[in-house]
């Protein structure tokens, strides 16, 4: 690949936000390239079933991502399977540097690198992902209606999702490794008042056990007494943190205390022409439909920015 190849727009990340951005960029006739180091689709691609994306009552996560990808390819979006090492803002062009040293330049960049749910790293967690193990109650809670589940964690997300699950499941075990929750006081009060939630403090989940049909039970250990036991259930929702993939966010861009990129309503960062979308961007909730909306917004805003940049360059050349 030739170095210093110039584009109108570079999109980093091939999840729903990045692919939607690519679709809108191609419709705007922007010279665009999307860079994805792995399989396009992001976290959604490894989600078993999706029931909350408009237009599909139920669709597999991988199948939904393939539809995003097919739509983008219909417009002949160029997709490169490469790893981005750094993004470097510039005066005339912004630059993207690959791990092999290749450099691409563009008037605008959309950062769509997504994020990663933190894991417990215990036996059975990976094996039963999508078969009883989940990191999103609003995404997967419906599948556990009238069943018994566990929520692991002690922050706001864990408490909120335990409350959400308590309305649709038979019983929720809320398991926290400390003696008190870290979540807000009002959420704690609501959890304490919910008869469908059983709280287990000072306890760690040590293994997730199951069979061909999915999760059957979990192994737990009391961190004070050392006592061990099993709890029979069908689902485990893990909320021990979410890490936005912000490693390639350039210096000078404002990031929240929790690592999310702060943008304006156009998804534009503090650096003109650099946008952040999807799970990388700070917003009210992380959902597939919101990630796609971010991609649309950023591409429309980027198209306007690029046209203004090109107009300014033409004036400069004529002057």
Image (cartoon, grey):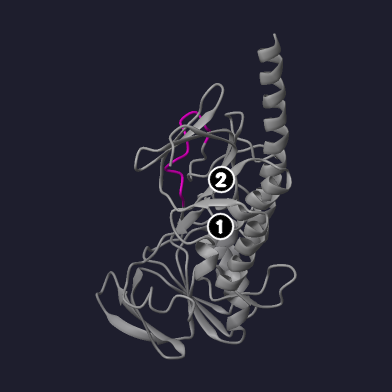
| Residue 285 forms part of the magenta stretch | no
Q: Nearer the viewer, residue 104 or 227?
A: 104
**Which secondary structure, mark 2?**
strand
Residue ID at (39%, 87%): 210
In the rendered image, residue 149, in percent from the top left (x then y), is placed at: 50, 80
Q: Is residue 222 above or below residue 287?
A: below
**Quarter location, residue 99:** top left
Q: Is residue 92 above or below residue 224?
A: above
Q: Any mark on residue 33, and which?
A: 2
Q: Tell me which secondary structure the magenta stretch mostly adopts.
A: loop
**Which secondary structure, mark 1?**
loop
Q: Any mark on residue 15, and which?
A: 1
Cα separation between marks 1 and 2: 14 Å
- Which quadrant of the rendered structure holds the C terminus? top right
In the rendered image, residue 209, in percent from the top left (x then y), is placed at: 36, 84
In the rendered image, residue 166, in percent from the top left (x then y), is placed at: 60, 76
| Residue 251 forms part of the magenta stretch | yes
């Amino acid at each position: 690949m030739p170095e210093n190849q110039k584009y109108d727009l570079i999109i980093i990340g091939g999840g729903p936000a990045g692919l939607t951005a690519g679709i809108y960029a191609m419709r705007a006739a922007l010279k665009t390239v999307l860079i994805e180091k792995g399989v396009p689709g992001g976290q959604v691609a490894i989600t078993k079933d999706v029931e909350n994306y408009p237009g599909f009552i139920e669709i597999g996560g991988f199948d939904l991502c393939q539809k995003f990808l097919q739509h983008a390819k219909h417009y002949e979006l160029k997709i490169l399977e490469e790893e981005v090492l750094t993004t470097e803002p510039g005066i005339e062009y912004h630059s993207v540097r690959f791990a092999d040293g290749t450099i691409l330049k563009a008037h605008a960049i959309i950062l769509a690198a997504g994020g990663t749910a933190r894991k417990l790293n215990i036996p059975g967690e990976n094996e039963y992902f999508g078969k009883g193990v989940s990191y999103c109650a609003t995404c997967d809670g419906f599948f556990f209606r009238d069943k018994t589940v566990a929520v692991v964690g002690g922050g706001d997300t864990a408490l909120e999702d335990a409350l959400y699950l308590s309305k649709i499941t038979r019983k929720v075990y809320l398991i926290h490794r400390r003696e008190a929750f870290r979540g807000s006081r009002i959420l704690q009060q609501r959890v304490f008042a919910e008869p469908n939630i059983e709280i287990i403090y000072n306890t760690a989940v040590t293994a997730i056990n199951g069979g061909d049909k999915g999760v059957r039970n979990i192994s737990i250990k009391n961190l004070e007494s050392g006592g061990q036991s099993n709890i029979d259930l069908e689902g485990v929702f893990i909320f021990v943190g979410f890490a936005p993939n912000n490693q390639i966010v350039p210096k000078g861009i404002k990031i929240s205390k929790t690592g999310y990129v702060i943008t304006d309503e156009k998804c534009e960062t503090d650096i003109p022409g650099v946008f952040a979308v999807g799970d990388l961007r700070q917003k009210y909730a992380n959902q597939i439909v919101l990630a796609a909306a971010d991609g649309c917004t950023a591409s429309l805003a980027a198209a306007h920015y690029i046209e203004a940049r090109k107009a300014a360059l033409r004036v400069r050349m004529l002057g």
